[in-house]
Image: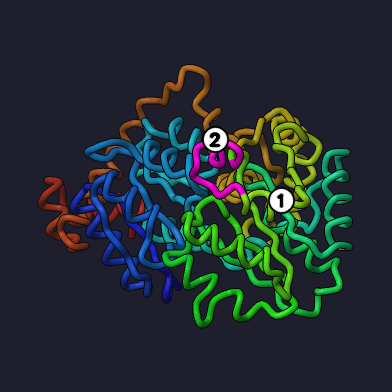
Amino acid sequence: MLDGRRIVLVEDDEIMGGSLLQRLELEGAQVLWLKQMHRALGAIRTPQRGIDAVICDIALPDGTGEDLFITLCRTTTPPPFLFITGQGGIEQAVRLIKSGAADYITKPFDMSVFLDRLAQLLAPGETQEFPPILGVSGAAQRVEALIVRAAENAGPVLIRGGPGLGKDLVARRIHELSERRAAPFISVNLAREGDPEAALFGQDGAFRRLGEGTLFVNAISRLPLPLQRRLGEEIEQGIEGRLVTACGTDLEALVQQGAFDTELHYGMARMEIPIPPLGTRPEDAVWLLEQLFQRLAPAKAPDVTGIGALCLEAARDHDWPGGGREVRARLVRGLSLARGTLLQPADLFPERQAGEDGIKSLAEVREAAERAQIIAALERSGGQVGAAARMLGIARTTLWEKMQRYGLS
């Protein structure tokens, strides 16, 4: 299921971390297990090899998962993050989803549910699930007009915008509308490349394979300064293919700080396509939600036949700081939570379920605590039910009954 995937696991709990490491490796993943935030920061920021996903606990001994994610976001687009949180950390996890994290899962959880969430996050067809255009608003139509104009020309293009706004989709659309569409479209995401020099200029690098095609370099601000100058020289000399780059909204600040080469900035930005935040385009947010629902619901939740009017209104009012990725993450999670035939606001925004005071019933608290202890005992005993029952001070048959009740058998 995870054959060849490279995953960073950030978890300081020995039992939880060991259990996840063992299962992930059994599924075929290559796992780097780190137990401290500062070690994870360096490993993710400058990886030796590309990283497909990060599994991160919220509580860490030298910081938090939120600190790690936000710090990475200041200088790059991190790999997809799946956060692990306790019941008390749901509000924090939701805040991270708004900032562009892929998903979160609440302790205690079933391993099968965890693996399913991870598989959804790594799904190779995720990009194809998004429609090729950005929306139906006037702002989206203006972006589309710029895409058409860019496709008619041959010069470099710089796409600008925050996380999850579809910069890769815009680049691909430029290619597919241009005369180069029969040539290759090559994408290099510098946020996930351990060796950017090899990815761009190596023997099997992008420039060697480009020909008359289109090279899309995402997260261009991650390129080291010496390689920035080398790329600038390539542009100056003239490349056979077409260069399209993408960055966030802070490139000018990096230029002023001397962290980004001025000549490269001017060379690759002969035409710019800015993508407005999704929160400023509420009609596009609703449209995208409906488009993704049509693509995802039949396979993931066939009993859910539509999106309720209140849910659409809630989507219209939300500011969507995580862009389209947040829309997809919330929809996938909402489809797994939905209990009726229509998606409701609480499905899309589970942080609202507990009400304004966040008070749960005593029965809910008791059940959550009991389930957590059973999972901990099973993990400590290596899955031996008899040994786990002795740790918990109950009969083996009683433990079996409780495991069936909580879906742990």
What span is in magenta? 251-262
Q: Quadrant of residue 59?
A: top left
Residue at point 67%, 64% (across, down): 235
Q: Is residue 113 above or below residue 360?
A: below
Disc on the earlier residue, 2 or 1: 1
Q: Is residue 148 left or right of residue 238?
A: right
| Label 2 residue SS | helix
Hey, what amino acid is under mark 2?
A: Pro
**Is residue 63 shown in magenta?**
no
The residue shown at (34%, 66%) is 24
Q: Position of residue 395 (x, y in %)?
A: 16, 52
Q: Residues within 10 Å of mark 2 (few under 14, many from 20)?
A: some
Above or below for 194 versus 324? below
Question: Which is more toward the observer, 304 or 393?
Answer: 304
Residue highlighted by disc 1: 269
Q: What amino acid does circle 1 point to?
A: Ala
- Residue at 55% of width from left, 36% of height from top? 256
Of residues 248 and 270, the one nearer the viewer is: 270
Q: Say which residue appears at 61% left-offset and 44% top-offset.
A: 248
Nearest to the observer: residue 89 or residue 216: 216
Identify which residue, 155 or 78, lies in the foreground. Answer: 155
Could you say where residue 252 lies in the image, as x and y percent from the top left? 61, 38
Residue 93 image point, x, y percent: 45, 37
Determine which of the numbered discs, if any, sits on residue 350 in the image.
2
Residue 368 makes an appearance in the image: no
* Residue 263 in sight in this render: yes
Residue farthest to the top, as pictured: 357
Disc sitting over residue 7 in the figure: none
Q: Position of residue 399 (x, y in %)?
A: 23, 52
